[in-house]
Image (cartoon, helix red, strand yellow):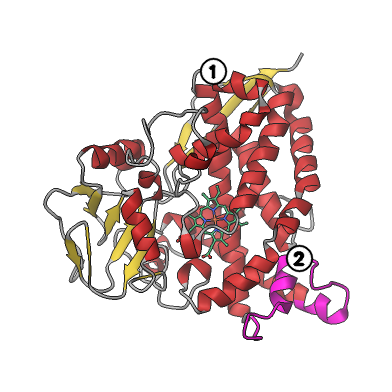
Amino acid sequence: MTNPKTHPVEGWAEVDFNSEPFLTDFKKVYEGMHAGGCPYAHSSSGDHYAVASHREIMSILKGYDVWKSKYGPALSYLETPGVLVSVDPPEHTFEVRIVADCFSKEIFESLIPDMEAFMQARLDEVFEDGAMDLHDAISVTLPLFVIHKLLGFPLEDEDGTSRIPWIREGIITMVGTMLDPDGDRADALAQLGPDHAGVQAAMRTQQMYAEHLAECKAKLASGEWQDDTNIVCRFLTTPGPDGTMLTEDKIMGFMNFLETAGSATTTIMLSNIIYRLLTEPGAYERVCADPELIPIAIEETLRLDSPVQGLFRTNDTEVEVGGCPLAVDTKVMLLWAGANLDPEVYEDPMTFNLDRDLAKVRRHLSFGYGTHFCRGAPLARLEGEIFLKAILPRLKNLRLNGDVQMEKRVPVLQGIRSLPVAWDTD
Ligand code: HEM
């Protein structure tokens, strides 16, 4: 690493965010940072700091003049302009106005019948088997189904072959490089080589987006499709506050971002909820008996098992964090997952507790906060609700049915890779 901007700081934790010990026991790391009274870390592999204090993260997120998103949410410094999470106002204001138009409550709620039908069809397919890998069968497929409904293109090729395996592979490869210790994602991908399955999958996905964009343009021009046929048509026809339109590069960027942000995260959340219900004593029975507990079950899982560990901000001017002076343009990882375990905010933070106050639990930072607060949060919550309302009454005596494996290929996201479950079929 040439001319690092960061260095070990006395009293701060030294953490290798790509290491096996971190990936196996990351919550212990955050717990240790809080218990030691110094919720700051220096990364021992990549050139960055990290913050786990809820209060400090909120203060950074409110420090709009200093803390910027222009270098992107990953450890690498973005060189070409990104979208949404990678831009600052006024560009962000322009983009978010368009997204807000496409992500309204009405649009999300219009998806409910399709989501419910999707869940029932999936359960019909597997019910008589009495067992499945719930992660692959539903947690992966439901969010992709939803985001493709919004974007407006199918999850199958013309011959009916599912696109899910390579779409997932592409996402895992791209997001997997976000914490690349050298801070150079392009280089990390180049090192994998053009024949790498993940790189090929990512290229195939780009092709799919380009074809969809061309189809939307052609069908809008011919009048076959309308402004509201799908969100890509909306992007093509919705002016920003100053009357100008999104460029095609930006629309491609939106498709990339939304497919990943809308699916990989929600997939983790869905599997985590089932895992919590089946492993926390009495939780499954309580939620089955009282579906009113579904919202707190979703929220408490989001708090305790944040799908996104953390994302970066970069300081535009010299500033101090935790008493340490930071050079301009230092990457600082805001540990959403660590803030959610902050004992200053949550009593007994490591405990899953369905009796917590819902409003207080919702102060978790799993969806971020402020300017870049997750625009898909209401949709993710809706998906969680529909998912549970389909599974709990239908799969009686749901239980774990083998080893639960964790996904370790994507350090910035932490979740389950395989969730074998069984149920009674009589
Ligand atoms: C459990 C599921 C989800 C989690 C944990 C999650 C997490 C996050 C986080 C932490 C951010 C803030 C990024 C930052 O401040 O740097 C964010 C932003 C965003 N998310 Fe989500 N997300 C989820 C689901 C979704 C879904 C389903 C969609 C859309 C279909 C979505 C769309 C967005 C968008 C558009 C932004 C950018 C907001 C902006 O920059 O203005 N997310 N998400």
Quadrant of the image where one finds ligand 1 = bottom right
SS of the residue at dot 1? loop
Residue drawn at the location 18% of the way across and 49% of the way down: 12
The answer to whether the beta carbon of the residue marked 1 is less than 8 Å from any atom of ligand 1 is no
Query: Which residue carries the number 2 mark?
Result: 230
* Residue range highlighted in magenta: 217-245
Up the image or down, 94 lies above or below 6; here it is: below
| Quadrant including the N terminus | bottom left
The residue under the point 52% across, 74% down is 92
Of the 4 image quadrants, the one containing the C terminus is top right
SS assignment at label 2: loop
On screen, 314 above or below 49? below
The percent position of residue 386, horizontal first and vertical second, equals 70, 39
Residue 141 visible in the snapshot? no
Residue found at x 59% / y 68%: 254
x and y, in percent, of residue 74 in the image: 40, 62
Q: How many marks?
A: 2
Which residue is depicted at the point 76% across and 47% down?
112
Q: Nearer the viewer, residue 316 or 140?
A: 316
Residue annotated with mark 1: 282
Q: Of all residues shown, which one is farthest toward the left?
A: 10
Q: CA distance from mark 1 to mark 2?
A: 42 Å
Specify whether residue 218 is painted magenta. yes
